[in-house]
Image (cartoon, rainbow, N blue to C red):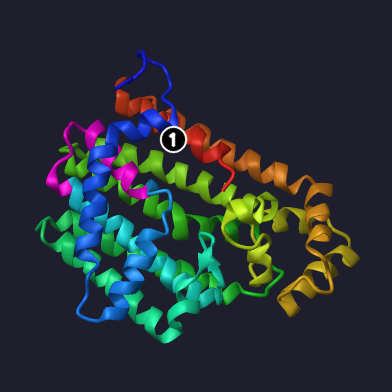
Amino acid sequence: MNLGKLGQALTAREIFELIQHDLEQVEKKITLESVASVDAVTAIGQYLHSSGGKRLRPSLLLLAAKLAGGDPASPMAIQLGAVVEMIHAATLVHDDVIDTAQTRRGRPSTNIKWGNHTCVLAGDWLYMQAFQIALRERVFQVLDLLIGLTQMMVEGELLQLERIGRMDISEADCMELVDRKTACLFSVCCRLGCLAGGGDLISQEKLGEYAWNLGMAFQLVDDVLDFTAREKTLGKPVGGDLREGKITLPVVYALECASAEERRLVEVILRERNYAAVPFERILALLEKYHAIERVRERAQAFTDKARQVISEFPDSPYQRALLAVTELVTERDH
């Protein structure tokens, strides 16, 4: 295995090689634990599991565990890797119901295949199954982190619902949702990994800070890609957030400078929930006119730089370099 020279950044392939065996164990654990006594729940779990995804959250957890001294990864790290991915899957099921989504990762979303009622309950089951696995560790700190995380994410969904279709969304509003819906989960992944690897509280806090900044950058890049990516690459229709009535940071920045007539273009989409009257290209042109995409990328880069600064405080190792390299992969990705 090529781990590179000291101080040298790792490639995506080298990062994956560091945790490949452990990630395979996580995958097996998820498959095993996603079997329910009701066939529909099992089918939904397997459908989500087989649709791929980046597995970024368990990867962060495993790398944090190894950085903290757990190499090979402990059974606890494998268990918790499955837990965070199952919690993430549960949020996706619920999100698609709330957003009335049509596609996810290039395939029909679960709510389209199984219906809203079944999917809400399947999402609940996945949450509870994830907590059941975590409970087996008999570590109160694990449950404390996961309960706090789940409450943060649910509150984030409720706040987002309250703001659907509204124009008076501020930069601070957007950042709050990014924190609650994405960054807090990234942070808990690295905290749990460090805990599973035997790391002390200071290391847990520092890795949590690194991952929080990484999560903020990840979601801001996501918000940009919703407007700039190709649909085939993104795995769902472009411009979906605005179509669903959500004002994200690129639109907030554009609206700060927009004329009354330009603001009305956005109002029409929020009201009609489609791009029939106002083509998507006009909104994209508006974002470009006021350098909104560029400004959001700069904000994402600032969070990335902070993540790099925090992880650079750890001693050099393949795992430290992997976490350093992840920051570039997040910022420069196209989906």
Q: Is residue 128 magenta?
A: no
Q: Which residue is mark 1?
A: 326
| Residue 205 position by quadrant | top left
Q: Above or below — where is 180 with respect to 11?
A: below
At x 78%, y 62%, the residue is 280
Residue 190 seen in the figure: no
**Image location (x, y in percent) of residue 96:** 49, 72
Residue 233 seen in the figure: yes
**Image location (x, y in percent) of residue 307:** 45, 35
Q: Residues within 10 Å of mark 1 (few under 14, many from 20)?
A: many
Q: Above or below — where is 12 with respect to 22?
A: above
**Image location (x, y in percent) of residue 257:** 82, 54
| Residue 185 position by quadrant | bottom left
The quadrant the N terminus occupies is top left
Q: Is residue 312 left or right of residue 252?
A: left
| Residue 243 position by quadrant | bottom right
User: Is the magenta region chiefly helix, strand or loop?
Assistant: helix
- Under mark 1, the amino acid is Val
Q: Which portion, as a residue range, is magenta?
A: 57-76
**Image location (x, y in percent) of residue 75:** 13, 46
Q: Nearer the viewer, residue 127 or 213?
A: 127
Q: Above or below — where is 211 with respect to 223?
A: above
At x 28%, y 73%, the residue is 42
Q: Is residue 29 left or right of residue 254?
A: left
Determine whether the residue tagged by mark 1 lies in a helix, strand or loop.
helix
Report the label total. Answer: 1
**Which residue appears farthest toward the top when viewing the image?**
5
